[in-house]
Image (cartoon, grey):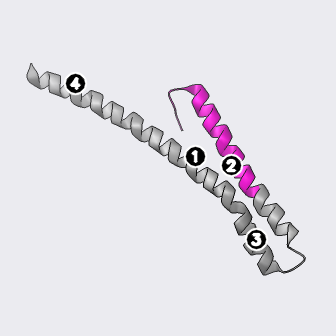
Amino acid sequence: MRFESKTLGFVINFLLGVAWAMMLLGAFTSFFSFYENSILFAIVSAVIGAIPGLVAVLFLEYFITDKEKLEELKKQTALLEKLLEEKKI
């Protein structure tokens, strides 16, 4: 994931790591909290406990993809403007 700004790339990657850690922590704590009751109930609660972290990962990945798309569109616009100027001459 390359961004023009090094600090933005660092912050996004750091937050992505935090989101994955939050997902794992939520899944493990939910699983081991309800493990004594039933293994099926523990698995279901682990999936539910992982959802907030997965939503955060999904949001950050969407942000990264949108930012990359914006950069590509800027490059395409510059190339199209260059072609348009060459055609006018």
Neighbourhood count class around disc 2 (C-alpha, 10 Å): few under 14, some 14–19, many 20 upward = many
The secondary structure that dominates the magenta segment is helix
Image depth: mark 4 or mark 1 in front:
1
Residue beneath label 1, please? 60
Residue beneath label 2, please? 19
x%, y% of residue 64? 52, 42
Please report whichever mark, 4 or 2, sits nearer to the chain's N-terminal start. 2
Residue beneath label 3, please? 45
Rendered position, 69 above or below 58: above
Q: Residue at x 74, y 50 (%)?
A: 21
| Direction right: furthest residue | 36
Alpha-carbon span between mark 4 and mark 3: 56 Å
Which span is picked out in magenta? Answer: 1-24
Image depth: mark 4 or mark 2 in front:
2
Neighbourhood count class around disc 1 (C-alpha, 10 Å): few under 14, some 14–19, many 20 upward = some
Q: Amino acid at mark 2?
A: Ala
Residue 82 tag number: 4
Please report whichever mark, 2 or 1, sits nearer to the chain's N-terminal start. 2
Alpha-carbon span between mark 2 and mark 3: 18 Å
Tell me the quarter of the picture where residue 1 sits. Answer: top right
